[in-house]
Image (spheres, rainbow, N blue to C red):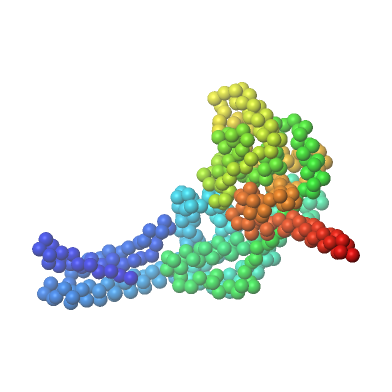
Amino acid sequence: MATVEPRRNKQGVITSWRITISDGYRPDKSQKRIFRTFHADPNKTENAQRKQAEKYAARLETECEDKKINDAKKITFSKVYEEYSDRLDDLVFSGDLAQQTADSYKKLFNNRLLKEFGGMAIREIETDDIDRFLRRLSKDRKPRTKTKSTVSEKKEQPKKLSGTYRLKYFQQLNGIFKYAKHQKYITINPCDNVEKNDKPKRDTQEAQYYELNECAKIMDLLSVYTDPKWKAYFSLSFYCGCRPGEIIGLNWSDYDGENIYIQAGSYQGKGEKCKRTEKPKTKKSKRRIMLAPEAVTALNAWKAEQAKKRLKCGKCWQNPEAVFTNDEGERIRPQAPTKAWKNFTTENKLRHLPLYDLRHTNCSMLIASRELSVEEVSARMGHEQTSTTLNIYTHAFANYNRRATTALANVLKAAANDNQ
C-alpha cells in the first residue's frame, strides 16, 4: 500500500509530495521501502494535488508489482533458500533459535530438498511436485553410515525414513514457501493444498527402558565402578534422568553440593569443540534437581579427581567451569559418553540400550513408584507439556492402570465377601 505525504517550506506552502511504497521484507523482518518525490501542479488546491500524487503512486506501485512478478518468475528455490538460510542465522544471532536446531534444518535442505527442488523456479513448484516428493520419501531409506562393518551387517538393508523424519522435511518445505509468500515471490503456498492423509505423521514410538531387576544390577555395578568421570556421568543419567546434552553442558556453578540446576544445554558443530549453549531444549527444561546420595558421592569424587588433572595440566586446561571434561580440560564431546556407556554395558554383560534410555528408565521408575503425579514427573523431566510425558511413557502408565484395576477389583471382591 502506497502512502503520500506533502512536503512544505517554511511558509507552509507545499513544494512536493513524498511517496512511500512497501516492497516486501528483508530476512531480518525489517520492511523494504521505495521512496519517490512527486511534483504536483502548484496552481491546484491541496486536495487536487493529493489526487495527482495518489494517482502517480498507484501507477508506480503497479510498476513495482509487475517488476517483482517478473523477477519472481526467474527466482529459483535455491535462491530463496539462501535468503531463508540467512534468516535462520539471524534468528540464531538474536537468540530466538538454537544453533543446533538451525543446523538440523539446513541439513534437511542439503540432504534432499535442494537436490529435488533447487533448480526449479519457486513459482513453478506445485502441490503435485510436493506430493511426488513425499511419496518418494516414504520409500526412501536412510543413507548408510561410512563405518567398518562385518559381512552380516553389510547384508542388512538401511532402515526406512521414519514418519517423524519425513514430517521434518515437510515442515521445512512449508517454512520456505511461507517465507516466499511473505516476500511476495509466490501468491499461493503449494504445501497448503497437500491432503491431510498425504502429510507425513509423527511416529509415536514408546520409550525403551531397563526393567527393575536390570536397574538393581546397574546400581550395583555403578557402586563399584572405578572410573570417576563416567561413574558421575552415568549416575546423573540414571538417578536424575537428565538429557545427555544437559549433563555435558553443566558447569560447576550449577552444582551446590545437593542439587544441580539445569539452565543450559550443549552443542557441537561440525569440526568444532563442544560448547555450552545459552538456552536449554525447552523453557520447562530449566529446573532444579535434587541429587540422590549416590549421585552426590560420585560427583564429588569426580570433582576431586578433575582438580588433580587440572593441577597436573596447569595453564593448558581449557575450560575451568565445565563439569565433564577430557584430559586437556575441554568440555567432552557428545560421542564420548555414548562410547563409554557401550563399553560399560559390554564389559558387564548388561543388555545394551542407548544412553538416552537411562533417562527413560528414570522416568519409568518414577511413574512405577506411584508417589508422583504426572505433572510432578513432567516437571522433573523438564518436559514442555504433560502430554509429552503421557505419550512417551505409555507403557508405564498402562502398567500402573493395570495394577490400579487389579487393586480395585480385589477391594470390591473383599467387600463382597464381607457382606456374605
Q: Residue furthest left?
A: 11
Question: Which corner quadrant of the image does residue 18 belong to?
Answer: bottom left
Image quadrant where one finds the C terminus = bottom right
Query: From what the image shows, is residue 258 above or below residue 269?
Result: above
Question: Which corner quadrant of the image does residue 140 belong to?
Answer: bottom right
Query: From what the image shows, is residue 89 above or below residue 167?
Result: above
| Nearer the observer, 372 or 409 | 409
**Res. 171 visible in picture:** yes
Q: Horizontally, is 84 left or right of 284 in the view?
A: left
**Residue 371 at x, y percent in the picture:** 71, 50
**Residue 317 at x, y percent in the picture:** 57, 28
Question: Which corner quadrant of the image does residue 27 belong to?
Answer: bottom left
| Nearer the observer, 253 or 372 | 372
Query: From what the image shows, is residue 52 above or below residue 269?
Result: below
Total marks in image: 0
| Nearer the observer, 241 or 316 | 241
Q: Residue at x 78, y 36 (%)?
A: 221
**Res. 149 visible in picture:** no
Q: Residue at x 67, y 29 (%)?
A: 301
**Residue 136 at x, y percent in the picture:** 65, 67
Query: From what the image shows, is residue 219 above or below residue 194?
Result: above
Q: Horizontally, is 121 left or right of 135 in the view?
A: left
Image quadrant where one finds the N terminus = bottom left
Q: Horizontally, is 57 left or right of 186 in the view?
A: left
Q: Residue furthest right?
A: 420
Q: Residue at x 62, y 69 (%)?
A: 199
Q: Residue furthest front?
A: 419
